[in-house]
Amino acid sequence: MSRTDRSDRPDSTDRSDRAERLEWTGRSDRADRPTRTDRAQLILVGGVVVAFALVALVLLLNTALFAENVATRGLGPGPDRAADHAAFADRAAGRVLRQEERVEYVSWADAEANATDGLRRIGAAVRTREFSEHGAVATMEPDAVRPGAALVQNDTGGFRSAGGTANWTLADSTGGIRNYTMTVDADGTSSPANATDAFTVRIEGGSEVWEAYVYASGSGTVIVNVTGETCESDSSVATVDWTRGTLDGCTFPFATDGSGRALSGPYDVAYLNGDEAEGTYHLVVRNRTTDDVETQHFGDPGTATLPRRYHTVYAVRLAVGYEGSSVDYDTHVRAAPGEPENTSPAS
Amino acid sequence: MTRDDTGSSGRAFDRPGSPGDRGVSFTLGYVLTVAIALVLVTGVLFTVGEVVRDERDEVIRGEAAVVGDQTAAAVMAVDRLAGRDAGSNATVSLDLPDRLADQAYTVSLRTDGGDTFVVVRTRSPSVVVSTPLRTRLPVTEATVAGSRVRAVYRGDDGTLTLRGGER
């Protein structure tokens, strides 16, 4: 009796086991019991293995999620901040040098000390800001300050030397020329039949010589003629940028080699027929030696003589460093505002 | 009479009374049941195993691609930073996963002709993912173990490369 009950019980709590339904020897207890035990084991083991597989799958998907998360993080702001810091140092040094140019320094020592102090003050401010805001150490330290001379005529007049010479050399074998601008007034400028008789700006770099003829047109404008290519001003007063080669938005090739790069130095700068035109000019030349500038043609620093020369900084080299959590960077930045593009810097 | 009792010869055969018939049928049925169950369960296990394996390969491939992209980005960041001045020194450190789906991996910087690649490689399963990149500065080939990877430029050497370990 009890045997029959035992065999019946699983039938009543049928687990929809297919094998169970196939059973037609219901009363054969002895054979039935071990069969069910075996089947249950098989399914149990299968279930456990599938469960483990599912856990493994979940772990894998979690890993994939982590990878996607890492993918969205990028490199962090470190490298960009380092690049920004170097670019800032470049701009700051350029501004300091432009500011320096406005001050007519009588001695080179004053010019150098002021530029160095200014850059050090900016460096200290940047260092404090970067450290407090981003926990990074940002440094900029003047590494080399190159002496220069500003040659200016800031009142309209003929392009003659201080002694009145019309054909004269401003600088001889100078290391560089930057920020060379000129205004030419058509009213005081001649318009000769032959361009070579006009006021001429002559730059010699290496073995190449470039000459630009500047003269007035019949309609009261100014024309710059370089090897046949001409640019005409919009009004009677023209602003010429000799380092960039532009006149009122018109560009002309000047002092470049065949591939458009700036001529390699040293450079000579000369004016020919200086009494054929009137205007102002400003340029900074790099002093490689003390006699680069033809000082006898200029008024001394601090005098009212025109044209006049005074001391300034030609270029500055900064040692720039940036050390953050993921980036470590040190480089050098050289600033010489208004220098022709593609100049190969003569240290 | 017996015929009447049983109704038909078929019923007499079906009835679970004949010991010889039961013995044969039961053994057959048992073996069949176990065999079918075994085949089914084995099939399920095999399929699940395949799915997990495929998924693992796919995950490793995906992670390797992410690691390759990050390393390439770091190398190009160093290229940009160091390109400013030939005497620059630049290092960008990366914090990458220790393992890819529990597999150790290596990160390499490789050049092939004029092309540069970051190659991420695991041994088992063998997965190789390469990410192309472009640099202006010359590159020195290097292979480092995963996790801590640094993209480095030293002005003295004049080349970009990868280094491992802490900085």
Image: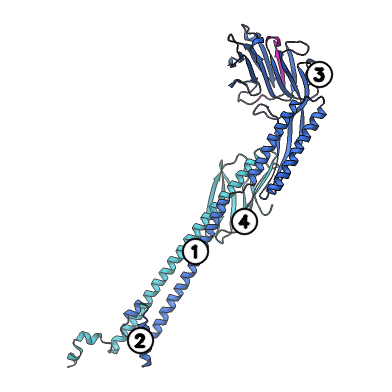
Q: Which residue is mark 4?
A: B147
Chain assignment, label 3: A
Mark earlier in primary sequence (1, 3): 1
Disc 4 crowd, CA 10 A, few/some/many (<14, 14-19, 20+): many
Question: Mark 4 and mark 1: span between their CA atoms?
Answer: 23 Å
Tell which chain the image draws in cyan.
Answer: B
Q: CA distance from mark 3 to mark 4?
A: 68 Å
* Front disc: 2 or 3: 3
Image mark 1: chain = A
Disc 4 is attached to a residue of which chain?
B
Look at mark 2 in the image and give the residue it sits on.
Answer: A8
Residue A270 is situated, as x and y percent measured from the top left of the image, at 71, 16
In this picture, which residue range is highlighted in magenta? A261-276
- Between the residue at mark 1 and the residue at mark 3, the CA separation in whole angstroms equals 86 Å
- Amino acid beneath label 3: Thr
Residue A35, position as x, y percentages in the image: 39, 82
* Amino acid at the residue labelled 1: Leu
| Residue denoted by label 3 | A303
Nearest-to-viewer mark from 4 and 1: 1
Q: Are marks 4 and 1 in contact (CB under 8 Å)?
A: no
Name the front one of labels 4 and 2.
2
Quarter of the figure that contains the C terminus of chain A: top right
Mark 2 and mark 3 in contact? Answer it, CB < 8 Å: no
Is there a contact, CB below 8 Å, between mark 1 and mark 2?
A: no
Describe the element under mark 4 as helix, strand or loop.
loop
Q: Secondary structure at mark 3?
A: loop
Residue A339 within the segment the image draws in magenta? no
| Distance CA(mark 1)–CA(mark 2) | 41 Å
Of all chains in the rendering, the one displayed in blue is A
A263 falls in the magenta region = yes
Same-chain status of marks 1 and 2? yes
